[in-house]
Amino acid sequence: DKQLYAGFMEGVNQFIKRIEVRAVQKKAEIEEERAREVLEKGADAEDAVDISEIPLEQRLGPGGLDPMEVFESLPESMQEAFESRQKEKLEEALRSMTVDEAEYHMKRCVDSGLWNA
């Protein structure tokens, strides 16, 4: 009886260990897939919201500016940086401008809610 029980428990413990190892692998695979989707699409499709469907009064930023309007008025390099969500690209875009120009665009980004100061 004790030998059967010990053998059974050994089998159960090995099964649990295999499940634990596979769970870690599966989690890594899921995270890798999500990261790949974000890079390909810029965001998870299910998280994507069409901002143009939100009424203007609701989408105005803390400074009263419309984020859509501000985004469309930004230089292309800044638009690409925001779309890619890469801070380094934004810094590079800002360094390519005069100080006054960079301050102007960043103030509008803050006032529209595109960027948090």
Image: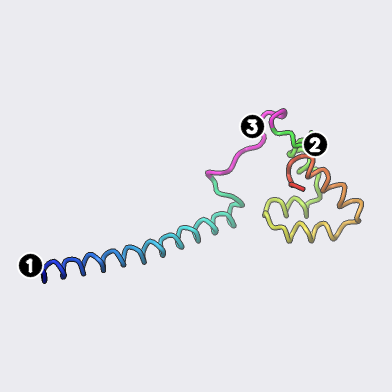
Instruction: Specify which label sits upstream in the sequence, 2 or 1.
Output: 1
Q: Residue at x 74, y 46 (%)?
A: 116
Question: The N terminus lies in which quarter of the figure?
Answer: bottom left
Specify how the rendered protein is coloured.
Answer: rainbow
Disc 2 is placed on an element classified as loop
Task: Give yes or no for residue 32 being in the magenta stretch.
Answer: no
Q: Which mark is residue 117?
A: none
Question: Is residue 53 on the magenta stretch?
Answer: yes
Q: Quick one: SS at disc 1?
A: loop
Image point 78% across, 45% down: which residue?
109
Q: Secondary structure at mark 3?
A: helix
The overriding secondary structure of the stretch rendered in magenta is helix
Looking at the rendered image, the disc whose residue lies closer to the viewer, 1 or 3, is 1
> What amino acid is found at the position of numbered circle 2 in the picture?
Gly
- Percent x, y of residue 96: 85, 60
Q: Which residue is mark 2?
A: 63
Q: What amino acid is found at the position of numbered circle 1 in the picture?
A: Asp
Rendered location of residue 99, percent (x, y): 91, 55
Tag 3 residue:
53
> Alpha-carbon neighbours of circle 2 within 10 Å: few (<14), some, or many (≥20)?
few
Q: Is residue 15 above or below residue 53?
A: below
| Relative side of 28 to 98, left or right | left
Which residue is tagged 1? 1
Instruction: Pick whichever, 61 or 17, lies toward us.
Output: 17
